[in-house]
Structure formats: C-alpha cells, structure tokens
Amino acid sequence: MAGRWFESVAVAQRRARRRLPRSVYAAIVAGSERGITMEDNLAAFGELGFAPRVAGQPASRELETTLMGQQLSFPVVVSPTGVQAVHPEGEVAIARAAASRGVAAGLSSFASKPVEEVVAANPRTFFQLYWSGSRDDIAGRMERARAAGCVGMIATLDWSFDTARDWGSPFIPDRLDARAALRLAPEVLARPAWLWSYLRAGALPALTVPNMALRGEPAPSFFGAYGEWMQTPPPTWDDVAWMVSTWRGPFMLKGVMRVDDAKRAVDAGVTAISVSNHGGNNLDGTPASIRALPAVARAVGDQVEVVLDGGVRRGSDVVKTLALGARAAMVGRAPLWGLAASGQAGVENVLDVLRSGIDSTLRAIGRSSVHELCDGDVVVPAGFVRQLG
C-alpha cells in the first residue's frame, strides 16, 4: 500500500470524494433536512476534552474487549451500512478487513453482497434487520442469517422515511437501464478510476439487495425492498420481544436515544443497545449520540451492553465513548471512506488509524486498559449531556 497510506479518516474521505461519482459520494454523506444532527454528531466530540498525564504512564495498554459474546482486538465494530457501491467487493472487502484486524462487522439487510459471502469472509458478523414485511418474512431473514453463521442480530428501528435534504438528494436509479446510464454518464466518466474498477470486476453495481430475499429467492431491487419497508406498520415493543425470542441469540437494538426506551429494551430481553441517531440520516434535530450516551449508560449499563454509533472518526473519539459508559464504538462512514479510497486495504488503514489512536490516547491519560476508563478521564462541559425520556 506504499504511497496510498493515509494518516486520518479525514484524508480517506478526501480521497473518496476525488474517486467517487458525485451521486455515490453524496449518498454516503447523506444526512437529512438541514443536517443539524449529522453535524452535531461530529461537533459534540470536539466539545469533550482530556486531562493528560506527564509521567508515570503505562508502558503497554490492553485494548481487547468483548461484545455480544465476540472477542474484539479493540473496542470497535463496523456498523452495518446499505448498498456499498463505492467498490466492487463492497461488504465482502469490509468483512475481510475487519477479520484481519480482529473486530466484528455488521451486515445490512440492504447490503449489496449476500450474507453467505460476507460470513465466509468474517465469521464475526452481526446481521442487521429492519422491520419490513410480515413476521414470516422477518423470521425467514433471521433464519437465513442463522444458517449462514451470523453470530448476532442488530435490529434497526429508528427510521421515519423523511430524508429531504436542503442540499438535494443524489440520483439513485432503481436499475441501471439505458436512461439511468445516460443521466449518470457525465459524473461517472469524470471518475474513470471508479468506473474502471467495476469494468475489471465484470459488472456495474446491480442495485439489488440480496439479503431482503429468503433463501433461493431472487434479490429484489433496492427500491422494491424499500417500498415494502415503508408500507410495513411500525413495530411495537411486543414485536421487539418477538424478534429477540425468535432469534434466540445475542441481540442488539439500534437507535436508542431515550432512557425510557432503553429500559423498555431491557424488558424486551435484548443483549445490547446502540445509542444511535442513524448517523444524522433520520429525524433532524435529534442530539448527537454521544450527548445521549451518559444518561442511557447510567440507566441500563449494568443490565445490558451499551455501544455508541455516530460521529466516531478518531481513536480518541472511541476513548471518549468508552469513558462515558459505552462498551464499544460502532463506525459506519469511516470504513466506507477507506473502502472507496483503497478497497480492503483502505478499510484496514482506517481500522489501524482508530486502533493507534485508542492506544496513544490511553497512554496520554495514563490508563493501561480500556476497561479502566471512566467519566473522570474526560472533560465534559456544562450542559453537554442530554437526558431524553
């Protein structure tokens, strides 16, 4: 990877922006409405500080932890993200990269690669489930994930389908027919390296979502599956409990921001909860995930595993997350920037950047293990925490 190594996630993002067609890049950046929540996810980490030690720091640091029964070499999990058309290998490349660095990866129901291929690349795969279709449909997707060897389930329920963006939404066709190709041609031809990577792989993005199909069924189109999801009535807490009992294994509820929701999730029998606002892609005006984390962790952290998703770009962000009560951090956009920049090697680069940042931050603040971190390790300004519910 000589000459292509990058020293921060921000550099990976800049390289991704130069490489990707405009619509593909815009789909990753995403965000909803004015982008208030998306921006706050990043800005909030900047409001937190550290009090470093000048001598007596530990010579080595322990980074390993566990989550949902899986050993992690450091406290990071790759968050599930939908159709990864930034690179021909998509979720398989991310899974391989995560496996090579000893961490787990989430796989979206709206992924571009089938669950069987992804689990083969990384046995520590958590399958992400949306409440879409009938209970039989949902149970069938769970059974397929179980048969493929997924070791945990992530239910993502925080989506209200309002994605209007003040800067405009990218054009995403239902299929790459002649009309769509003609419309996309100027921006694709302006990024020949991206186009050449797909031509070498033998096919352009299929824009289908194979994991929304039951085993043996053809993969629906992205918008076909999205339409089913939109038309499915929202789940109840009884439905959440049903999913937990149907899966019969480690189960994470993602999208929890309120204390009362966290308590209901515990009552439903979940193994873990993810404090998350869907990366700022859902209800704009929701506070940054890190602002909601301390109250949720205090309320239920002794009963379930708590993780955070949203805005993590540095190893120091992971340390802040753990100090405020999380067991691990989930990262979504950062691995995608790496994937777009350099494929599997780029994802490995991102994970190495995060791991190195965790280690150096622990050294600076005088902690020998991620398990020693506490809220006294971070400087939290007055009014930073938001207790919802």
Image: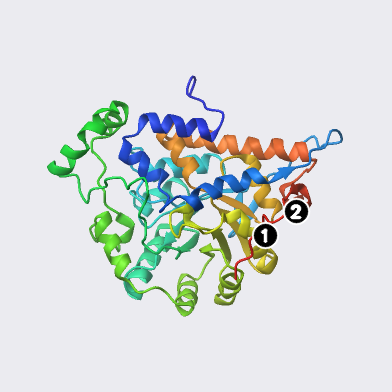
Rounded to the nearest angstrom, the CA distance separating label 1 from label 2 is: 9 Å
Find numbered disc 1 in the image and state the secondary structure of the residue it sits on.
helix
**Residue hosting label 1:** 294
Identify the mark at residue 356; answer none if there is no mark.
none
Q: Position of residue 119 (x, y in %)?
A: 43, 51
Amino acid type of the residue tagged 2 in the rendering: Asp
Of residues 168 and 16, the one nearer the viewer is: 168
Q: Is residue 21 left or right of residue 280?
A: left
Q: Residue furthest right?
A: 56
Q: Position of residue 387 (x, y in %)?
A: 64, 65
Q: Position of residue 38 (x, y in %)?
A: 49, 49
Judge whether residue 166 can be spotted in this image.
yes
Evaluate if marks 1 and 2 touch, with contact meaning CB atoms under 8 Å apart: yes
Amino acid type of the residue tagged 1 in the rendering: Pro
Of residues 94 and 120, the one nearer the viewer is: 94
User: Splitting the image into 4 quarters, where does residue 301 fall?
Assistant: bottom right
**Residue hosting label 2:** 375
Give the quadrant of the C terminus.
bottom right
Neighbour tally class for label 1: few under 14, some 14-19, many 20 plus, Cα within 10 Å: many
Q: Residue furthest top?
A: 3
Neighbour tally class for label 2: few under 14, some 14-19, many 20 plus, Cα within 10 Å: some
Q: Position of residue 360 (x, y in %)?
A: 70, 35
Q: Is residue 236 above or below residue 223?
A: below
Q: Is residue 67 left or right of residue 155?
A: right
- Residue under the point 28% across and 34% down: 198
Q: Earlier in the sequence, mark 1 or mark 2?
A: 1
Find numbered disc 2 in the image and state the secondary structure of the residue it sits on.
helix
